[in-house]
Structure formats: C-alpha cells, structure tokens
Amino acid sequence: SRQGERQRYLFFVEGLNEAVESRQRRLRELRNAIDDGGLTLWFQPQLSSDRRRLSGLEALVRWPHPSDGLLAPDAFIPLAEEHDLIIPLGEWVLKAACRQLHEWQQLGLPVPRLAVNLGARHLLDSRLPGFVADLLRDYELPGHCLEVEVTESTVMEDITRSEEVLSRLVRLGVQVAVDDFGTGHSSLAYLKRLPIQRIKIDRSFIAGLPDDAQDRAICRTIADLSHSLGLQVVAEGVETTAQAAALQQMGCNDLQGFLLARPGPITRITHWLRHEAP
Ligand code: C2E
Ligand code: CA
Ligand code: CA
Ligand code: CA
C-alpha cells in the first residue's frame, strides 16, 4: 500500500541518518585519537630466510578504541584517507616509529631496520622528506634504519611527484620497499625509474606454496626479476615451514609472517627482541 511504502521510506531515511551520524562520530574520534596519542604501534619482525638474523621490523598501526576494542587498520585507514587525516596519521606513525627505534637503541636492543607504511598522499607531499629529516636528527638515527613501504598503485598515481619525494628520502639514506608486489595494475617501468631497494611479495602468492604451481612460478619469477635488478626480496604472510623452505630455496632474502613472529605491541616485541630474536 501507499502507506506501507511511505513507512518503509521513512525507515530507510532514518537508517541513512544513523549511518551518517555514526560515521561523523567515528571521524571525530579518529581525529582526536591522532591528536591526543590515542593510536598505538604494533610491530612484526622480518628475519633473514635462514632465520639466523633479525632483518627488521614493520610498524603496523592499531587504534585501541574506548568502546569498540582494538581496531585494525582496515577499520580506519580508509576513513583517514577519505577525510584528509592520512597525512597527520602517517606523521604520527613516523614519529612514533622513530621514537621507538631510539628507545630500543637506548635499551641495547638495536633494530637494523624499521619499515613504515605510507599512503599515496604522502608521496605527493613535498614536505615529507623535511619532516623525516627532522625526525632522524631529533632521534639521532641514521637514515638507513628507516624504510618506507609504498604500493604500486600508490606510486603510479603520480609517478613524477612520487619519484621526487622518494629520491629526496633516499638521499637521507631512507630505504624504499614496494609492498603487495604483483597486486596493483601497473607496468614494470617504475621499477627502473624509482629508487627502490626492496620488493615485498604479496601474501596472496605465498598462500599456495609449496604445492600450487602458479604461485610457485609467480614467486620464483618475482624473486629472479628482483635479483636481476639488484633488489632484495621479502615474502610476507609466511605461515608454514614448507612455505618458508620454498621461499628460501627461491632466494628470498627475508621472511615475515605468523610462522616467524606475530605482530605485537611494544612490550611484547621488546620481550621478543631481548629473549627470542635470533
Ligand atoms: P600490509 O602492509 O600488507 O601488512 C601486513 C598485514 O598482514 C598486517 O595486517 C599483518 O598483521 C598481516 N600479517 C602478517 N603476517 C601474516 C601471516 O602470516 N598471515 C596472515 N594471514 N596475515 C599476516 P594489519 O596489521 O591488519 O594491516 C593491514 C594493512 O593496513 C597493512 O597491510 C597496511 O596496508 C595497512 N597499514 C598498517 N599500518 C599502517 C600505517 O601505519 N599506515 C598506513 N597508511 N597503512 C597501514
Ligand atoms: Ca606493509
Ligand atoms: Ca604487504
Ligand atoms: Ca598484503
């Protein structure tokens, strides 16, 4: 009936309003969390593929939300990207990462390399290299202990400007890794053009190892290509010893994944560095 339809429409509008309001609330909360130290960093180790050496750590942001529990990045990074919060969020992550590197250094637990994820906006931000230079100076860190992870899609958004920002970072000694390699839509031309040191094979290609012939071919090809170009290779999402063995045999330099160590908060990783790291 006409009446029923109107009723349904009103419910629909009410539902929309609620969705908009809860999104606005989430956005306000996120802005405050970034400004007031409400975010936290977790870290996941990367080991050499023979597992005898700590190669570095990757910083992974978390949001301990007062009512919704510990939120993973997928729950708030897209929101930050849509609403111009990704730059302040990324700056918070970079600063927290450098502060923690300094702290571990002070504790006599030196970490050779700390990788930080950057979104597309950062590579278009000409102030980023200056910001990073200040952090390195303030926390007395050599540039080579910091690595930025960028995705193919990110650099392809504006390759000329990305190239400029990345080159300035590299001049500070900072290393550059291409994250989620093989999942973006792009040519390989940027590998030649950008100052990259490392490629991370996406975990979707690791999952089928060692049995899946296609995944094996893809991983081996990425490893061979990287080495021919003088780049190092990291495999992410390594969960089984069989995967680790296959990747080591293919010549992957480093491994990262639940098999080696799960991501953890600072206290857990500090304990790991002190008692469990190779
Ligand atoms: P990513 O850069 O590909 O990070 C690796 C993700 O894989 C992490 O999820 C990690 O917890 C998970 N992982 C690690 N080892 C394994 C494994 O063996 N098996 C499986 N199934 N998963 C594994 P997380 O922490 O939820 O991060 C998700 C994504 O959020 C990251 O993907 C990255 O793209 C983004 N992200 C994380 N931290 C930041 C940040 O500080 N800034 C930005 N812009 N993005 C971030
Ligand atoms: Ca990453
Ligand atoms: Ca990745
Ligand atoms: Ca991935």
Image (cartoon, rainbow, N blue to C red):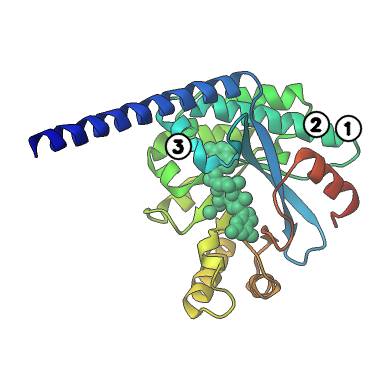
Q: Is residue 108 left or right of residue 60?
A: right
Q: Quadrant of the C terminus?
A: bottom right
Residue visible at 50% across and 56% down in the picture: 181
SS at circle 2: helix
Disc 2 to disc 1, C-alpha distance: 6 Å
Which comes sooner in the sequence, label 2 or label 3? 3
Determine contact: label 1, label 3, CB under 8 Å: no
Task: Say which amino acid is labelled 1.
Answer: Gln
Residue visible at 44% across and 25% down in the picture: 84
Task: Say which amino acid is labelled 2.
Answer: His
Residue 254: quadrant of the picture: bottom right
x and y percentages locating residue 102 in the rendered image: 80, 31
Q: How many marks?
A: 3
Determine contact: label 2, label 1, CB under 8 Å: yes
Q: Which mark is residue 78?
A: 3
SS at circle 3: helix
Q: Residue furthest left?
A: 2
Residue 69: quadrant of the picture: top right
Vertical placement of residue 160 versus 49, above or below? above
Disc 1 to disc 3, C-alpha distance: 35 Å
How crowded pointer 3 is (Cα within 10 Å; few <14, some 14-19, many 20+) is rated as few
What residue is disc 2 on? Answer: 102
Tell me if the residue at label 3 has its CB under 8 Å from ligand 1.
no
What residue is disc 1 on? Answer: 106
Task: Say which amino acid is labelled 3.
Answer: Pro
